[in-house]
Amino acid sequence: MFKKVNSGYHIPFIKMCMKVVKKIGIVGATGYTGVELLRLLVKHPDIEITYVTSRSNAGTRVDAMFPNLRGYIDLKFSDPTTDALAECDLVFFATPNGIAMKHTAQLIKSGTKVVDLAADFRIKDVKVWSKWYGMEHACPELLTEAVYGLPEINREFLKSASLVANPGCYPTSVILGLLPLIENNLVELDNIIADTKSGVSGAGKQANVATLFSEMGESFKAYGVAGHRHQPEISQILSLVSNQAVDFTFVPHLLPIIRGIHATIYSRTDADAASIQQLYEKKYENEPFVDVLAQGSHPETRNVKTSNMCQIAVHKSTETSRIVVLSVIDNLVKGAAGQAIQNMNIMFGFEETSALDRPALLP
Amino acid sequence: MFKKVNSGYHIPFIKMCMKVVKKIGIVGATGYTGVELLRLLVKHPDIEITYVTSRSNAGTRVDAMFPNLRGYIDLKFSDPTTDALAECDLVFFATPNGIAMKHTAQLIKSGTKVVDLAADFRIKDVKVWSKWYGMEHACPELLTEAVYGLPEINREFLKSASLVANPGCYPTSVILGLLPLIENNLVELDNIIADTKSGVSGAGKQANVATLFSEMGESFKAYGVAGHRHQPEISQILSLVSNQAVDFTFVPHLLPIIRGIHATIYSRTDADAASIQQLYEKKYENEPFVDVLAQGSHPETRNVKTSNMCQIAVHKSTETSRIVVLSVIDNLVKGAAGQAIQNMNIMFGFEETSALDRPALLP
Amino acid sequence: MFKKVNSGYHIPFIKMCMKVVKKIGIVGATGYTGVELLRLLVKHPDIEITYVTSRSNAGTRVDAMFPNLRGYIDLKFSDPTTDALAECDLVFFATPNGIAMKHTAQLIKSGTKVVDLAADFRIKDVKVWSKWYGMEHACPELLTEAVYGLPEINREFLKSASLVANPGCYPTSVILGLLPLIENNLVELDNIIADTKSGVSGAGKQANVATLFSEMGESFKAYGVAGHRHQPEISQILSLVSNQAVDFTFVPHLLPIIRGIHATIYSRTDADAASIQQLYEKKYENEPFVDVLAQGSHPETRNVKTSNMCQIAVHKSTETSRIVVLSVIDNLVKGAAGQAIQNMNIMFGFEETSALDRPALLP
Amino acid sequence: MFKKVNSGYHIPFIKMCMKVVKKIGIVGATGYTGVELLRLLVKHPDIEITYVTSRSNAGTRVDAMFPNLRGYIDLKFSDPTTDALAECDLVFFATPNGIAMKHTAQLIKSGTKVVDLAADFRIKDVKVWSKWYGMEHACPELLTEAVYGLPEINREFLKSASLVANPGCYPTSVILGLLPLIENNLVELDNIIADTKSGVSGAGKQANVATLFSEMGESFKAYGVAGHRHQPEISQILSLVSNQAVDFTFVPHLLPIIRGIHATIYSRTDADAASIQQLYEKKYENEPFVDVLAQGSHPETRNVKTSNMCQIAVHKSTETSRIVVLSVIDNLVKGAAGQAIQNMNIMFGFEETSALDRPALLP
């Protein structure tokens, strides 16, 4: 059944014998974010996946559901209990919104760190959160403590964080694309547009007519033009960074691809092309996972497919004040599981790029 | 709302004014077979769609669910009643298996013709049917009366049929591909293989994890190798035509395309290439919807996308007895809605190609 | 070979016998625009395709290159000569830029009407044209005479036109999306953005690494951000309509689909949602091929796939001045061949919707 | 430009400082096989890529052509010279057929090992080779020396090989699927069929109308039914293994996916299901890259996407003699670059799984 263990090819026994590896739990590991965490973590040198949960699939082997993991993980899905979770050093919640907040307080009390890949701790203002997510918050007192897990903004806070709100996929691509401009107050803050496009895996793995192959294939559409939950998340960060209100227009679209986000960001600026380019390069020169392309480049989403990289290109017209920023990520990696692992690496003091330092897949 | 009617552009008023048009009902019109019936029928000169049903969407405008039909149909989905159905001249059942058989007896009694696009009347042996479909048959007495709606075999019977079992999508492609060989007893009947590949729309429009875009995209797999319901359907016809038992191997696969079936059929024969080719051309020369390509051709599924055509190419090796037949159809047209309309045309004595005589879409 | 003619199923002989049908030539019919013209025209009741050219494929049967047309067209590709073209009543140029302008003067002199699906006659200012298309114009004297073939703007002029410049695909979607706003001077003319996305067929059928399946599949990118030829085409029309300069930002992207354009258009306005919606509905109420959806709708490109329809939805925030217009077309139909036929229908006084009045394909 | 080197994130400096790393050259690195070699090799602990060639792109940075490699490789493409190649410890030829054979003799003389990913050394009989590849062989004397690089057959020979013929993609999937049956003489050797389906990347990265996105998308077809070069390659191995002539039917098809091969293999056998399953499990129990699934499974190509694994499932009917074997690989990994690296690992005595031991990508 799990012959690869016997033949010794895949499972890094050495790390299992070491005492220092951290025990990792994953709650809700049957979705796309969950399997992506597993795919990346099985090769992480400093951790051991000890507990993988799914209420509806308890008892099923993980590699029976995800045959790409055969030979890499010898666990079954468990029905989650807080006690068992509390034995982990860190728990990833790859669950729908509203689940993590029910377990987090107790876990943190037990000394278990939490990274929530859902939205429970992303918005600081509990009223705004409730309005957009349609429920009461179970532990509003933790909202202040939660660190927004975008390392490019919050690396220092992440080092000592117990609770990390992993950013949304769109927000990651848009905020990284805008950060140098906003920090330096270079664009019209009441005139920013992010026209974003996401692969279908961003919609999750629930049975749903709207995301069937025959519905999504050979077609393209906008959705949520009237309002999308990632709008207040982005606005919150942009306002925080700029110390001003931001009138931010956010229009998401669904792409007939599995993975990838492309944000096309528009604003106007008085700054010239060269100095803006310099600003971006300076801002991100030490960032392992933000790559600023030459001005005028057109990053493709496949440039970063399967990788934790965000590629950014700036286009500034010489004739007008128009600035266009292009930003691409893999929504399941830098937009979810990869960034969660980057956050974990920082929280535990591991090499920040551990398990993430691989080139993207092309073609 | 339905302005196109007023501006007179799309709805053929003339046919509405004529007395002779037939009233058509469609039960279960929210699936892919249903919308394909609607797409084709709205331009049919001799019929009027009077009744379109969907239990779960009763009251919704048809064109609200299918925006491609805006301007072409001014109906709402109704909750189906047998009385209302009985006012139609013909009812198409585009329902899951097991629905049509509950209504058919009464409809036929009322003089309403029935074309079932599901499998309720495809298998003559009720025990075989029950085994494969996992339920009791509601009206086994109608199985003899039902005509298997493959015009290339049963055109004469269809002219006077009240109840037509519209063939399965795979069976249509495979039977048409094999017919000349089987009729002439030219191949090893215990050594026939059909390796078939279908687009995802064949799996229907139900919410289902397995047919999500992110599950089906960029992948390919076989399914049902141990047994598929279309195997006994095909075997029944091949045995009937050959008057012998047929050991027929059927392996279906799922293609990451929306529409299209490609059957690759293998057997062995003593006949030579030229005479086989001649046989196919002769057999189908007067068939409006079977097109025999030059020997050695490779039909692509897109050659027939959106059309009711079946394209067939024969490959006979000169060195061995191996024969390979390639057969392509659009699973939603010749494999479902188009063939159903072809059957209706024959049943009503309309021009057989009415509403179906359009070139395929390429690219 | 062309057996369908004999069996009488597909070719409308009747129209061939009539004296009044117009003779149509297509130059450069081997590309995607060409085959789309053929697909639509073979069922047009008032014309006969008499001459189909391709220098590199002269002598090849048209249906050997396009097997979807088997049974619908009994012609071979010819090497084009101006004399033979002059025998047509109308010639479509489905050629690369720079070809039509070499033949047009002589054809018009001979009384043959011309519809150019390329860009030779779209830009009125010959200097602007030369700058963007990188060549000298062969007949600048015809630029004034040429009518820009967007019926929603120029229907009256088209009725008597001899030379029609068929609009670009992006311009069609963007101009129709903006027209009611620009005509009524309701938006900030120095702050309009069109973020457009096109299927790959828009890039044509030339052998090209960049548009290979393995390059385009599972990816998405912007291109031509620094400048695209459709920008001056759109600006010219918007300025003409508004009688003012327009600062128009145009960013095209490539979608991994074959057919479809989605334009997401941004501006700001003081007008309220209801009055804008009314304006759009009023503007287009008699247009056969522009369909205004309910406010807040999200048209999908597949809603219009294979059809000549443009679907438009307006989104106006109640809280800010932001307006977002969504506009979808099939780039090969309303964006090219379909619109060319619509123009031909107007030029010849045919029913404007002839050969175009079919619902879109879904799924 | 290559800032990641400075920040030390991606390039493993340590291995560069070690004396023992092998110097690797890649000829023709601009195709899909080439970039896949690069993607995998940049993280290989025991080698250094020192020389990457492309005649037409000499001088271009490798990561300018392949932006997924930014930060992982700091080389430009070189114009290949045999002298420079001879300084490598091993050279991969990722070139069209007919190139490697011109350089190999001299390289081997210089002590440089060669792995040819093309077909120059796959067929032992030079007449057969010339017939199928349409050219004279440049060094027939090396054909005996060349080892067919399927480790599951030739591991021992590979350990001391100087010249390795990396197997074709289809042959890898088909031979691994048939090996236990053929070795044990369990199937009818005159009645074997492989119905194979490949992703489009298998057709390479040349500019070609037939593999454009708009040609391949939403369609499916067979090709080369009359004869394909991989037929004699497979037959040669099957005959060698069985010591008998094999009448082997091979029909390839093109899938609208980028990566993946699915072979559906048919034959007849007297053996029972359980013993066959046992045979497969036994045969492959120590193979790191062949994974036998439970009987009756349906492997999907995505199970192995991006990985070097071959997944196999056996289906044996209880009622008939029919046996169906399903075998999936990633054509660019186990079907090309991954297997080439596996061969290199064996040739140099590295850990066989080095650089290849990663789970597949899902979804």
Image (cartoon, coloured by chain):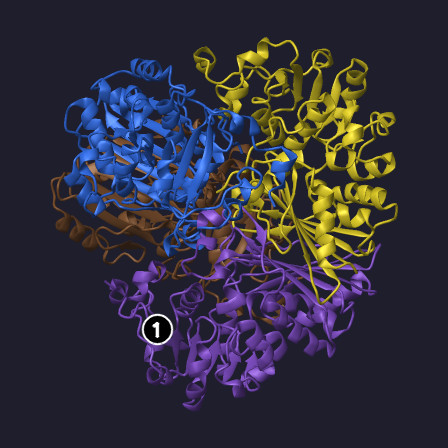
Chain colours: A yellow, B brown, C purple, D blue
Chain identifier of the residue bearing label 1 in the image: C
In the image, A95 versus B104, the foreground residue is A95
Q: Quadrant of residue C27?
A: bottom left
Give coordinates of residue C83: x percent, y percent.
34, 85
The reply to whether residue B112 is in sight is no
Q: Residues within 10 Å of mark 1 (few under 14, many from 20)?
A: many
The reply to whether residue B281 is in sight is yes
In the image, D354 versus B355, the foreground residue is D354
Query: Quarter holding the C terminus of chain B?
Result: bottom left
Give coordinates of residue A177: x percent, y percent.
71, 47
Whether residue C4 is situated above or below residue A5 in the rendered picture: below
Name the residue at 73% across, 34% down: A151
Q: Circle 1 sits on which residue?
A: C53
Whether residue C324 is situated above or below residue B202 in the rendered picture: below
Whether residue D282 is situated above or below residue D307 in the rendered picture: above
Question: In the image, what residue type sits under mark 1?
Answer: Thr
Q: Which SS class for mark 1?
A: strand
Residue placed furthest toward the bottom: C109
In the image, B142 versus D353, the foreground residue is D353
- Give the side of residue D70 with respect to residue D143, left or right: right
Q: How many marks?
A: 1
Query: Quarter holding the N terminus of chain B?
Result: bottom right
Give coordinates of residue A73: x percent, y percent.
54, 18
Give coordinates of residue A35: x percent, y percent.
58, 27
Name the residue at 75% across, 16% down: A112
Name the residue at 54% across, 34% down: D363
